Image (cartoon, grey):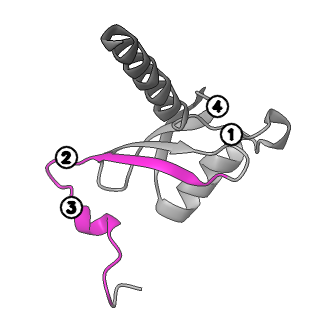
């Protein structure tokens, strides 16, 4: 009885862990994807980023770029909607997180 409980608990943990990992993937149909160049133009015009690379990973567009201050940007976008899914900013010496936060009166 005790070993059956341990096995079922372990199996449940594996299943839940697999489901959590799958949530990081994009699942939009390839036929709906927008071209990478559209994403490149959007982030360059909207944010002033200089894009070094856009690749596909787990069904998402993954972008590497630098901002106007030279901070390294890593971002993940849904390829059909171009909705931002994840953003990492590696600030250099001149970096300031306030550049990326909405502040009252900044608009």
Few, some or many residues within 10 Å of mark 2 (<14, 14–19, 20+): few
State which region is magenta: 82-104
Residue toward you, 11 or 77: 11
Asked whether disc 4 touches disc 3, contact meaning CB atoms under 8 Å apart, the reply is no
As helix, strand or loop, the secondary structure at mark 1 comes to: helix
Residue topped by disc 3: 96
The first of marks 2 and 1 along the sequence is 1
Q: Is residue 44 magenta?
A: no
**Residue 47: x percent and y percent?**
48, 61
Asked whether disc 4 touches disc 2, contact meaning CB atoms under 8 Å apart, the reply is no
Residue topped by disc 1: 36
Q: How far apart are marks 4 and 2 (CA)?
A: 30 Å
* Quadrant where the N terminus is found in the figure: top left
Asked whether disc 4 touches disc 1, contact meaning CB atoms under 8 Å apart, the reply is no
Q: Does the magenta stretch include residue 99?
A: yes
Residue toward you, 11 or 54: 11
- Compared across the picture, whether 93 is left or right of 30 comes to left
As helix, strand or loop, the secondary structure at mark 4 comes to: loop
Which label belongs to residue 59? 4
Q: Distance between the residues labelled 4 and 3?
A: 31 Å
The first of marks 1 and 3 along the sequence is 1
**Residue 94: x percent and y percent?**
17, 55
Q: In which quarter of the image is residue 30?
A: top right
The first of marks 4 and 3 along the sequence is 4
Q: Distance between the residues labelled 4 and 1?
A: 13 Å
């Amino acid at each position: 009885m005790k070993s059956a409980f341990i096995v079922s608990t372990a199996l449940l943990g594996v299943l839940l862990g697999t489901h959590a990992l799958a949530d990081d993937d994009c699942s939009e149909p390839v036929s709906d994807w927008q071209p990478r160049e559209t994403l490149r133009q959007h982030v360059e015009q909207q944010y002033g980023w200089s894009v070094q690379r856009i690749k596909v990973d787990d069904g998402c567009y993954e972008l590497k770029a630098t901002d106007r201050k030279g901070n390294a940007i890593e971002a993940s976008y849904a390829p059909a909607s171009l909705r931002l899914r994840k953003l990492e900013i590696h600030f250099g010496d001149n970096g300031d997180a306030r550049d990326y936060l909405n502040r009252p009166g900044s608009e």
